[in-house]
Protein backbone atom coordinates (compact mmCIF):
# COMPACT_ATOMS: atom_id res chain seq x y z
CA UNK A 1 0.00 0.00 0.00
CA UNK A 2 1.10 3.56 -0.62
CA UNK A 3 0.33 6.20 1.99
CA UNK A 4 -1.66 8.78 0.00
CA UNK A 5 -0.74 12.08 1.60
CA UNK A 6 -2.91 14.05 -0.88
CA UNK A 7 -6.03 12.55 0.73
CA UNK A 8 -5.40 14.35 4.02
CA UNK A 9 -3.62 17.46 2.76
CA UNK A 10 -4.01 18.55 -0.84
CA UNK A 11 -1.74 21.54 -0.18
CA UNK A 12 1.30 19.32 0.49
CA UNK A 13 3.68 19.87 -2.42
CA UNK A 14 6.52 17.51 -1.48
CA UNK A 15 7.55 14.65 0.81
CA UNK A 16 10.39 12.23 1.37
CA UNK A 17 9.65 8.63 0.38
CA UNK A 18 11.28 5.24 -0.03
CA UNK A 19 11.32 3.37 -3.34
CA UNK A 20 9.56 0.02 -2.83
CA UNK A 21 9.69 -1.24 -6.42
CA UNK A 22 10.84 -0.18 -9.89
CA UNK A 23 9.74 -2.07 -13.01
CA UNK A 24 10.56 -1.30 -16.63
CA UNK A 25 7.61 -1.23 -19.01
CA UNK A 26 7.42 0.03 -22.62
CA UNK A 27 10.52 2.17 -22.19
CA UNK A 28 9.24 3.76 -18.96
CA UNK A 29 9.91 2.90 -15.32
CA UNK A 30 7.01 2.18 -12.98
CA UNK A 31 7.96 3.20 -9.45
CA UNK A 32 6.13 2.28 -6.25
CA UNK A 33 6.75 4.37 -3.12
CA UNK A 34 5.81 3.96 0.54
CA UNK A 35 4.10 7.38 0.41
CA UNK A 36 3.38 10.08 -2.15
CA UNK A 37 1.90 13.53 -2.73
CA UNK A 38 1.20 12.67 -6.38
CA UNK A 39 -2.47 11.94 -7.10
CA UNK A 40 -3.03 9.16 -9.66
CA UNK A 41 -5.81 9.53 -12.22
CA UNK A 42 -9.27 8.71 -10.85
CA UNK A 43 -12.85 9.89 -10.53
CA UNK A 44 -12.60 11.75 -13.83
CA UNK A 45 -9.61 13.76 -12.62
CA UNK A 46 -6.37 13.56 -14.56
CA UNK A 47 -3.12 12.35 -13.01
CA UNK A 48 -0.72 14.75 -11.34
CA UNK A 49 2.80 15.20 -12.66
CA UNK A 50 5.98 15.86 -10.71
CA UNK A 51 9.43 14.52 -9.86
CA UNK A 52 10.96 11.68 -7.90
CA UNK A 53 14.46 13.04 -7.26
CA UNK A 54 15.78 13.78 -10.78
CA UNK A 55 13.24 11.53 -12.50
CA UNK A 56 10.18 13.09 -14.11
CA UNK A 57 6.80 11.60 -13.22
CA UNK A 58 4.84 11.67 -16.47
CA UNK A 59 1.71 9.98 -15.17
CA UNK A 60 0.52 8.00 -12.12
CA UNK A 61 -2.10 5.33 -11.62
CA UNK A 62 -3.47 3.32 -8.73
CA UNK A 63 -3.52 -0.47 -8.62
CA UNK A 64 -4.51 -2.59 -5.63
CA UNK A 65 -4.08 0.29 -3.21
CA UNK A 66 -0.63 1.25 -4.52
CA UNK A 67 0.26 4.36 -6.51
CA UNK A 68 2.55 3.64 -9.45
CA UNK A 69 4.56 6.54 -10.85
CA UNK A 70 5.48 6.34 -14.56
CA UNK A 71 9.01 7.79 -14.68
CA UNK A 72 11.53 8.56 -17.40
CA UNK A 73 14.42 7.16 -15.27
CA UNK A 74 14.97 4.04 -13.19
CA UNK A 75 15.18 4.41 -9.40
CA UNK A 76 17.00 2.10 -7.03
CA UNK A 77 14.79 0.03 -4.73
CA UNK A 78 15.33 1.10 -1.11
CA UNK A 79 16.54 4.59 -2.10
CA UNK A 80 15.12 7.65 -0.34
CA UNK A 81 13.75 10.21 -2.79
CA UNK A 82 12.26 13.67 -2.66
CA UNK A 83 8.76 13.54 -4.17
CA UNK A 84 7.88 16.91 -5.71
CA UNK A 85 4.45 17.75 -7.03
CA UNK A 86 4.03 19.95 -10.13
CA UNK A 87 1.74 22.36 -8.30
CA UNK A 88 0.74 24.31 -11.41
CA UNK A 89 -0.66 21.12 -12.97
CA UNK A 90 -2.37 20.04 -9.70
CA UNK A 91 -3.99 23.44 -9.20
CA UNK A 92 -5.31 23.37 -12.77
CA UNK A 93 -6.77 19.88 -12.27
CA UNK A 94 -8.39 20.88 -8.96
CA UNK A 95 -9.85 24.07 -10.42
CA UNK A 96 -11.46 22.23 -13.36
CA UNK A 97 -12.64 19.30 -11.24
CA UNK A 98 -14.03 21.34 -8.36
CA UNK A 99 -15.57 23.92 -10.69
CA UNK A 100 -17.43 21.05 -12.32
CA UNK A 101 -18.69 19.88 -8.89
CA UNK A 102 -20.14 23.29 -8.01
CA UNK A 103 -21.63 23.94 -11.44
CA UNK A 104 -23.27 20.48 -11.45
CA UNK A 105 -24.76 21.21 -8.03
CA UNK A 106 -26.18 24.54 -9.26
CA UNK A 107 -27.69 22.97 -12.43
CA UNK A 108 -29.36 20.32 -10.25
CA UNK A 109 -30.51 22.69 -7.51
CA UNK A 110 -31.80 25.52 -9.71
CA UNK A 111 -33.15 23.64 -12.73
CA UNK A 112 -33.28 19.94 -11.83
CA UNK A 113 -30.82 19.20 -14.63
CA UNK A 114 -28.42 16.37 -13.78
CA UNK A 115 -24.80 15.86 -14.74
CA UNK A 116 -24.80 12.49 -16.51
CA UNK A 117 -21.32 12.63 -18.02
CA UNK A 118 -18.11 14.49 -17.31
CA UNK A 119 -14.95 14.61 -19.35
CA UNK A 120 -11.72 16.43 -18.67
CA UNK A 121 -8.56 16.57 -20.72
CA UNK A 122 -5.56 18.89 -20.95
CA UNK A 123 -7.58 21.54 -22.82
CA UNK A 124 -11.27 21.19 -22.11
CA UNK A 125 -13.86 20.15 -19.55
CA UNK A 126 -17.31 19.06 -20.65
CA UNK A 127 -20.44 18.32 -18.63
CA UNK A 128 -23.40 16.49 -20.14
CA UNK A 129 -26.75 17.53 -18.67
CA UNK A 130 -29.87 15.39 -19.00
CA UNK A 131 -32.05 18.48 -19.47
CA UNK A 132 -31.14 21.37 -21.76
CA UNK A 133 -31.08 24.86 -20.26
CA UNK A 134 -31.82 28.15 -21.99
CA UNK A 135 -29.23 30.86 -22.51
CA UNK A 136 -30.76 32.84 -19.63
CA UNK A 137 -30.73 29.79 -17.35
CA UNK A 138 -27.08 29.10 -18.21
CA UNK A 139 -26.24 32.66 -17.29
CA UNK A 140 -27.94 32.13 -13.93
CA UNK A 141 -25.99 28.87 -13.48
CA UNK A 142 -22.72 30.66 -14.17
CA UNK A 143 -23.55 33.51 -11.78
CA UNK A 144 -24.68 31.20 -8.96
CA UNK A 145 -21.60 28.97 -9.41
CA UNK A 146 -19.24 31.92 -9.22
CA UNK A 147 -21.12 33.32 -6.19
CA UNK A 148 -20.38 30.07 -4.32
CA UNK A 149 -16.73 30.23 -5.43
CA UNK A 150 -16.36 33.85 -4.30
CA UNK A 151 -17.99 33.04 -0.93
CA UNK A 152 -14.76 31.10 -0.36
CA UNK A 153 -16.66 28.33 1.36
CA UNK A 154 -14.81 25.45 3.07
CA UNK A 155 -14.65 22.13 1.22
CA UNK A 156 -14.61 19.23 3.64
CA UNK A 157 -13.69 15.60 3.05
CA UNK A 158 -15.59 13.14 5.25
CA UNK A 159 -14.99 9.40 5.51
CA UNK A 160 -18.39 7.98 6.48
CA UNK A 161 -20.10 4.60 6.62
CA UNK A 162 -22.43 4.27 3.59
CA UNK A 163 -25.53 4.28 5.88
CA UNK A 164 -24.43 7.61 7.38
CA UNK A 165 -23.51 9.04 3.98
CA UNK A 166 -26.97 8.17 2.62
CA UNK A 167 -28.51 10.59 5.15
CA UNK A 168 -26.64 13.56 3.66
CA UNK A 169 -28.23 15.82 0.98
CA UNK A 170 -26.23 14.14 -1.79
CA UNK A 171 -26.46 15.30 -5.39
CA UNK A 172 -25.90 11.73 -6.57
CA UNK A 173 -25.55 8.62 -4.51
CA UNK A 174 -25.09 4.99 -5.45
CA UNK A 175 -26.91 3.01 -2.76
CA UNK A 176 -25.00 -0.14 -3.82
CA UNK A 177 -21.81 1.33 -2.36
CA UNK A 178 -20.99 -0.19 1.03
CA UNK A 179 -18.39 0.39 3.74
CA UNK A 180 -16.49 3.63 4.32
CA UNK A 181 -17.15 6.22 1.62
CA UNK A 182 -15.18 9.36 0.85
CA UNK A 183 -17.61 12.26 0.77
CA UNK A 184 -16.66 15.68 -0.56
CA UNK A 185 -18.86 18.44 0.83
CA UNK A 186 -18.81 22.05 -0.29
CA UNK A 187 -20.35 23.99 2.58
CA UNK A 188 -23.99 24.75 1.80
CA UNK A 189 -23.61 23.34 -1.72
CA UNK A 190 -22.42 20.16 -3.43
CA UNK A 191 -22.16 16.90 -1.48
CA UNK A 192 -21.11 13.77 -3.33
CA UNK A 193 -18.82 10.75 -3.21
CA UNK A 194 -15.50 11.50 -4.93
CA UNK A 195 -11.92 10.24 -4.84
CA UNK A 196 -10.36 13.29 -6.51
CA UNK A 197 -8.40 16.16 -5.04
CA UNK A 198 -10.27 19.33 -4.07
CA UNK A 199 -8.98 22.65 -2.74
CA UNK A 200 -9.71 23.40 0.94
CA UNK A 201 -11.79 26.47 0.00
CA UNK A 202 -13.94 27.23 -3.07
CA UNK A 203 -12.07 30.51 -3.67
CA UNK A 204 -9.12 28.55 -5.10
CA UNK A 205 -11.29 27.54 -8.08
CA UNK A 206 -11.10 31.20 -9.14
CA UNK A 207 -14.06 31.27 -11.53
CA UNK A 208 -16.13 29.15 -13.89
CA UNK A 209 -17.00 30.21 -17.42
CA UNK A 210 -19.30 28.28 -19.74
CA UNK A 211 -17.79 28.84 -23.17
CA UNK A 212 -20.09 26.63 -25.26
CA UNK A 213 -23.44 24.85 -25.00
CA UNK A 214 -24.78 22.45 -27.57
CA UNK A 215 -27.86 20.24 -27.68
CA UNK A 216 -27.35 16.50 -27.22
CA UNK A 217 -30.57 14.49 -27.69
CA UNK A 218 -32.84 15.66 -24.83
CA UNK A 219 -29.93 17.18 -22.97
CA UNK A 220 -27.01 19.48 -23.48
CA UNK A 221 -23.21 19.42 -23.44
CA UNK A 222 -21.53 22.34 -21.70
CA UNK A 223 -17.89 23.20 -22.21
CA UNK A 224 -16.32 24.91 -19.20
CA UNK A 225 -13.13 26.66 -18.33
CA UNK A 226 -12.23 27.21 -14.70
CA UNK A 227 -9.64 29.35 -12.90
CA UNK A 228 -6.37 29.70 -14.78
CA UNK A 229 -7.78 28.19 -17.97
CA UNK A 230 -10.61 30.74 -18.02
CA UNK A 231 -8.09 33.56 -17.53
CA UNK A 232 -5.86 32.23 -20.35
CA UNK A 233 -8.90 32.00 -22.61
CA UNK A 234 -9.96 35.53 -21.68
CA UNK A 235 -6.44 36.82 -22.43
CA UNK A 236 -6.43 35.06 -25.81
CA UNK A 237 -9.88 36.34 -26.83
CA UNK A 238 -9.12 39.82 -25.50
CA UNK A 239 -5.97 39.91 -27.65
CA UNK A 240 -7.89 38.77 -30.73
CA UNK A 241 -10.57 41.42 -30.17
CA UNK A 242 -8.03 44.20 -29.57
CA UNK A 243 -6.13 43.24 -32.73
CA UNK A 244 -9.35 43.37 -34.75
CA UNK A 245 -10.29 46.72 -33.19
CA UNK A 246 -6.82 48.13 -33.98
CA UNK A 247 -7.12 46.87 -37.55
CA UNK A 248 -10.50 48.60 -37.88
CA UNK A 249 -9.18 51.74 -36.16
CA UNK A 250 -12.09 51.51 -33.75
CA UNK A 251 -12.78 50.93 -30.08
CA UNK A 252 -13.40 47.37 -28.88
CA UNK A 253 -17.03 48.27 -28.08
CA UNK A 254 -17.54 49.45 -31.66
CA UNK A 255 -16.34 46.20 -33.29
CA UNK A 256 -19.82 44.57 -33.61
CA UNK A 257 -21.24 47.70 -35.26
CA UNK A 258 -18.23 47.99 -37.59
CA UNK A 259 -18.50 44.31 -38.47
CA UNK A 260 -22.18 44.68 -39.42
CA UNK A 261 -21.36 47.76 -41.49
CA UNK A 262 -18.51 45.96 -43.25
CA UNK A 263 -20.78 43.05 -44.14
CA UNK A 264 -23.28 45.50 -45.66
CA UNK A 265 -20.48 47.25 -47.56
CA UNK A 266 -19.18 43.94 -48.92
CA UNK A 267 -22.71 42.96 -50.05
CA UNK A 268 -23.04 46.33 -51.82
CA UNK A 269 -19.62 45.96 -53.49
CA UNK A 270 -20.46 42.45 -54.64
CA UNK A 271 -23.65 43.73 -56.23
CA UNK A 272 -21.78 46.58 -57.95
CA UNK A 273 -19.09 44.14 -59.12
CA UNK A 274 -21.77 41.88 -60.55
CA UNK A 275 -23.20 44.75 -62.59
CA UNK A 276 -19.76 45.87 -63.83
CA UNK A 277 -18.82 42.30 -64.72
CA UNK A 278 -22.04 41.92 -66.72
CA UNK A 279 -21.24 45.12 -68.65
CA UNK A 280 -17.67 43.99 -69.33
CA UNK A 281 -18.90 40.61 -70.50
CA UNK A 282 -21.30 42.33 -72.92
CA UNK A 283 -18.35 44.19 -74.43
CA UNK A 284 -16.25 41.01 -74.55
CA UNK A 285 -19.06 39.09 -76.25
CA UNK A 286 -19.34 41.81 -78.93
CA UNK A 287 -15.57 41.78 -79.51
CA UNK A 288 -15.28 38.00 -79.76
CA UNK A 289 -18.33 37.86 -82.00
CA UNK A 290 -16.90 40.52 -84.31
CA UNK A 291 -13.66 38.55 -84.63
CA UNK A 292 -15.38 35.17 -85.17
CA UNK A 293 -15.28 33.70 -88.68
CA UNK A 294 -18.52 32.81 -90.41
CA UNK A 295 -19.11 29.18 -91.40
CA UNK A 296 -20.41 28.07 -94.79
CA UNK A 297 -23.94 27.92 -93.33
CA UNK A 298 -23.71 31.51 -92.14
CA UNK A 299 -23.25 30.69 -88.43
CA UNK A 300 -20.44 32.01 -86.26
CA UNK A 301 -18.62 29.96 -83.61
CA UNK A 302 -17.95 32.06 -80.53
CA UNK A 303 -15.64 30.77 -77.76
CA UNK A 304 -15.83 32.60 -74.40
CA UNK A 305 -13.37 31.95 -71.59
CA UNK A 306 -14.35 32.72 -67.98
CA UNK A 307 -13.13 31.77 -64.51
CA UNK A 308 -16.51 31.18 -62.89
CA UNK A 309 -19.04 28.50 -63.84
CA UNK A 310 -21.91 30.45 -62.23
CA UNK A 311 -21.25 33.46 -64.47
CA UNK A 312 -20.99 31.09 -67.45
CA UNK A 313 -24.41 29.66 -66.69
CA UNK A 314 -25.92 33.12 -66.17
CA UNK A 315 -24.81 34.14 -69.67
CA UNK A 316 -26.78 31.39 -71.41
CA UNK A 317 -29.98 33.43 -72.04
CA UNK A 318 -27.85 36.27 -73.45
CA UNK A 319 -25.78 34.16 -75.88
CA UNK A 320 -28.84 32.03 -76.68
CA UNK A 321 -30.49 35.17 -78.05
CA UNK A 322 -27.68 35.88 -80.55
CA UNK A 323 -28.56 35.35 -84.21
CA UNK A 324 -26.63 32.71 -86.17
CA UNK A 325 -24.20 31.97 -83.34
CA UNK A 326 -22.92 28.80 -81.73
CA UNK A 327 -21.48 29.79 -78.34
CA UNK A 328 -18.97 27.69 -76.41
CA UNK A 329 -18.40 28.96 -72.88
CA UNK A 330 -15.47 27.53 -70.95
CA UNK A 331 -15.22 28.29 -67.19
CA UNK A 332 -11.67 27.42 -66.12
CA UNK A 333 -11.48 26.97 -62.33
CA UNK A 334 -8.55 25.71 -60.23
CA UNK A 335 -9.70 22.08 -60.04
CA UNK A 336 -12.48 21.87 -62.60
CA UNK A 337 -13.40 23.04 -66.06
CA UNK A 338 -17.08 23.58 -66.82
CA UNK A 339 -18.36 24.06 -70.34
CA UNK A 340 -21.63 25.22 -71.89
CA UNK A 341 -22.72 25.23 -75.52
CA UNK A 342 -25.77 26.92 -77.07
CA UNK A 343 -27.13 27.60 -80.51
CA UNK A 344 -28.60 31.08 -80.89
CA UNK A 345 -31.64 32.34 -82.76
CA UNK A 346 -32.06 31.15 -86.35
CA UNK A 347 -28.99 28.93 -85.97
CA UNK A 348 -28.80 25.40 -87.30
CA UNK A 349 -27.09 22.90 -85.04
CA UNK A 350 -27.48 20.26 -82.34
CA UNK A 351 -25.84 20.90 -78.98
CA UNK A 352 -26.00 17.20 -78.09
CA UNK A 353 -23.40 16.53 -80.79
CA UNK A 354 -21.33 19.55 -79.72
CA UNK A 355 -21.29 18.54 -76.06
CA UNK A 356 -20.10 15.07 -77.10
CA UNK A 357 -17.23 16.72 -78.91
CA UNK A 358 -16.38 18.71 -75.75
CA UNK A 359 -16.70 15.61 -73.57
CA UNK A 360 -14.42 13.59 -75.85
CA UNK A 361 -11.83 16.37 -76.10
CA UNK A 362 -11.74 17.23 -72.39
CA UNK A 363 -12.37 13.72 -71.08
CA UNK A 364 -15.44 14.95 -69.23
CA UNK A 365 -19.15 14.27 -68.88
CA UNK A 366 -22.23 16.21 -69.79
CA UNK A 367 -25.37 16.41 -71.92
CA UNK A 368 -28.44 18.45 -72.72
CA UNK A 369 -30.91 19.38 -75.43
CA UNK A 370 -30.50 20.39 -79.11
CA UNK A 371 -30.52 24.11 -78.23
CA UNK A 372 -28.26 23.95 -75.17
CA UNK A 373 -26.03 21.56 -73.23
CA UNK A 374 -23.47 21.63 -70.42
CA UNK A 375 -20.77 19.46 -68.90
CA UNK A 376 -17.46 19.47 -67.11
CA UNK A 377 -14.11 17.79 -66.64
CA UNK A 378 -11.16 17.81 -64.26
CA UNK A 379 -8.77 20.71 -64.74
CA UNK A 380 -6.12 20.21 -67.42
CA UNK A 381 -3.28 22.68 -68.07
CA UNK A 382 -3.65 22.44 -71.89
CA UNK A 383 -7.30 23.54 -71.87
CA UNK A 384 -6.66 26.36 -74.40
CA UNK A 385 -5.25 23.88 -76.91
CA UNK A 386 -8.29 21.64 -76.43
CA UNK A 387 -10.72 24.54 -76.79
CA UNK A 388 -9.00 25.63 -80.03
CA UNK A 389 -9.41 22.08 -81.32
CA UNK A 390 -13.15 22.03 -80.50
CA UNK A 391 -13.71 25.46 -82.07
CA UNK A 392 -11.83 24.41 -85.22
CA UNK A 393 -13.96 21.28 -85.52
CA UNK A 394 -17.17 23.26 -84.96
CA UNK A 395 -16.13 25.72 -87.67
CA UNK A 396 -15.49 22.89 -90.10
CA UNK A 397 -18.91 21.29 -89.60
ZN1 LIG B 1 -14.42 15.53 -6.86
Image: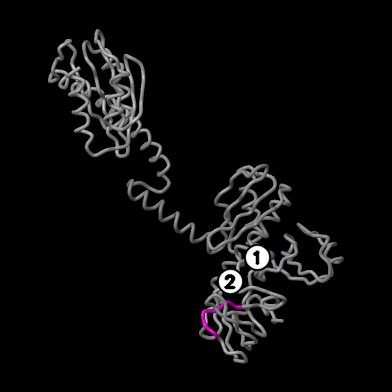
Q: Is the C terminus in the top left, top right, bottom left or bottom right quadrant? A: top left
* Along the line of sight, the residue nearer the viewer: 37 or 260: 37
Residue situated furthest top in the rendering: 346
User: What's the CA distance linking mark 1 and mark 2?
Assistant: 15 Å
| Rendered location of residue 87, percent (x, y) | 56, 74
Q: Residue at x 17, y 10 (%)?
A: 297
For disc 2, the marked residue is 90
- Visible residue check, residue 269: no
> Vertically, is 309 above or below 156?
above
Q: Is residue 387 left or right of residue 35?
A: left
Q: Is mark 2 within 8 Å of ligand 1?
A: no
* Along the line of sight, the residue nearer the viewer: 397 or 89: 397
Find residue 192 and report its image quarter.
bottom right
> Vertically, is 306 above or below 156?
above
| Rendered location of residue 12, percent (x, y) | 63, 79
State the extent of the magenta-drawn residues as a range: 69-74
For disc 1, the marked residue is 202
Ligand 1 shown in quarter = bottom right
Q: Is the N terminus in the top left, top right, bottom left or bottom right quadrant? A: bottom right
> Could you say whether the residue bearing mark 2 is in a helix, strand or loop?
helix
Task: Identify the mark at residue 321; answer none if there is no mark.
Answer: none
> Is 71 within the magenta?
yes
Find residue 199 and report its image quarter.
bottom right
Amino acid sequence: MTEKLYNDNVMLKSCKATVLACEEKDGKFLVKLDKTVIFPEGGGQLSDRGKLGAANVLHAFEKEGCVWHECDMALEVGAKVEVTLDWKVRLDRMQQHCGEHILSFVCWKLFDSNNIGFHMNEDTVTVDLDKALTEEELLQVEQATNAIIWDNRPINVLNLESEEAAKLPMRKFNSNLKGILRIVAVEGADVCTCCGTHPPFTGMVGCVKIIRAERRKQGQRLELLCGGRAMADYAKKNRILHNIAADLSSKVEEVPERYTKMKEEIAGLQEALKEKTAKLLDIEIQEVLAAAETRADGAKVMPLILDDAKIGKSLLPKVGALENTISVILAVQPERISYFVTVGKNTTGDCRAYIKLLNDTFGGRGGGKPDGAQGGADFCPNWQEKLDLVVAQLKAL
